[in-house]
Image (cartoon, helix red, strand yellow):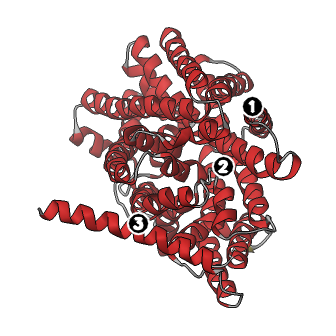
Amino acid sequence: MLVSLFAYFFLMMAIGYYGYRNATSDVSEFMLGDRKLHPAIGALSAGASDMSGWMLMGLPGAIYLSGISAAWIAVGLVIGAYFNYLLVAPRLRIYTEMTDDAITIPDFFEKRFLDTSRSLRVLSSIVIIVFFTLYTSSGVVAGGKLFEASFGLDYEIGLFITASAVVAYTLFGGFLAVSITDFVQGCIMFVALVLVPSVAFIDLGGYNTISSTLISIDPEFLNWFSGVTLLGLLSSLSWGLGYFGQPHIIVRFMAIRTLGDIQKARHIGMSWMLVTVLGAVATGLVGLAYVTVRGGSLADSETIFIYLSQVLFHPYITGFLLAAILAAIMSTISSQLLVSSSSLTEDFYKSFIHRDASQRELVLVGRLSILGVALVAIALSFDRSNSILSLVSNAWAGFGAAFGPIILLSLYWRNMTRDGALAGMITGAVTVLVWIYAPIQIDGKNLTSYLYEIIPGFILSFIAAIVVSLFTSKPQACITDRFDKMRQFITEYVDKRTLRKSN
């Protein structure tokens, strides 16, 4: 196992060195790969950075505990990812380049609305840093659990091993290294999530044995609607709303080479996602049957993938499968660290501390920011009582509610104003935080027990942005003209593609 893991670590470091040598000369290269990302790399990079340890640990663990009804979250995510590719990716790719080559989401907001007060940049940067630090800590928690469950190491040592490896290649290799490592990690995750449930399925003798075992445990285990209320179903499906506001995912759209490559990336990305999500759900179902039939035991349901990897495979293969978990964890952490770093560098340091900083200085600040955010995330991760799924859900809702409506409206509504964007962003972020942390209970349960916080956050953010935009001064002519050019560019491109197909 250690041989396979060390081989994996060596490969990640080699890619980091390649990125360091080829694409870290200036901030645009370090943060966005100079907008030259291949569609396959962009698609798998977006997918791998999206799913994190949740894919191989959180989702199988939820299925293991609650049955197939816990898979509604995955259904919502697949739907949300598809519409993210369809609605956000093409326009964001073109618009960010038209708005003076914006390379971060806060940078895009400021340039989209010509915000001379810089309030949009500052506020969105604060949202990114706060929620990404929380999000990053979920990945570090997953790494600590992995090394504890697999090698018997102390949980705290696992935290530092995971974080150190990610920081090393992200800090030196920048966006190019992160994207290529995400691509490799996405391939590893794909193979692992097909291999593990398939081998366990065959080992148990097929569908009849597995289904009868699961039904003997709980007759409703394979019922999609068992214990599911209407609000619970809406909460699970609403995870898809989060995609529109996830900076570490949509920044991949900004970096893809051309508009034509967006469609290729969508086909690749959605195919990858469907297979891996089905594999994760199957791992939870088959895993419970395997543990029951073979008389094993599992202290933590989120380690079912690790358990199956250890008992079903040769140690060399087990090492590869554990590397898949590391791949899921590290791909997300690296993307989040890079976006946090870009925000601290471009949106704080360059904007408010040293406007005339050289490219070399900005890259250095970016690297120091990566290290700083990682250290804070490690500190938060020492509370091992946090589940991976709960940490991810809070951060996911925060971004989805604060940024999702603003991204969509800024790309589709020419008359949206800066004040509308500010109002929507504040309303979304505050609603999510109040919903999670306010001491409000109904029948002894917190609000989050009834309805996922992204739903009220997203709806109120959308309403606030529209209402405030309608009651404030209309955007300047230069803003609406640029919006019209973006829309015309998209329309002409679609018309040309339609004409080529008809011919």
Tag 1 and tag 2, C-beta contact below 8 Å? no
Distance CA(mark 1)–CA(mark 2): 35 Å
* Residue 360, disc: 1
Distance CA(mark 3)–CA(mark 1): 35 Å
Q: Is residue 296 visible in the rendered structure shown here?
A: no
Residue at horizontal 66 percent and vertical 61 percent from the top:
398
- The mark nearer the N terminus, 1 or 2, is 1
Name the residue tied to disc 2: 391
Q: Nearer the viewer, mark 3 or mark 2?
A: 3
Tag 3 and tag 2, C-beta contact below 8 Å? no
Secondary structure at numbered mark 3 = helix
For label 2, count other residues whose C-alpha is less than 10 Å away and answer few (under 14), some (14-19) or many (20+). some
Tag 1: residue type? Arg
* The furthest residue to the bottom: 471
The quarter of the displayed image where residue 78 is located: bottom left
Tag 3: residue type? Phe
- The mark nearer the N terminus, 3 or 2, is 2
Can you give x and y, in whole percent of width and height, for residue 281 in the image? 39, 45
Vertical position of residue 461 compared to residue 143: above or below: below
For label 3, count other residues whose C-alpha is less than 10 Å away and answer few (under 14), some (14-19) or many (20+). some
Tag 2: residue type? Leu
Name the residue tied to disc 3: 489
Report whether 212 appears left or right of 128. left
Of 228 and 499, the residue lying toward us: 499
Can you give x and y, in whole percent of width and height, for residue 489 in the image? 41, 66
Residue at horizontal 11 percent and vertical 62 percent from the top:
503
Can you give x and y, in whole percent of width and height, for residue 97 in the image? 54, 55
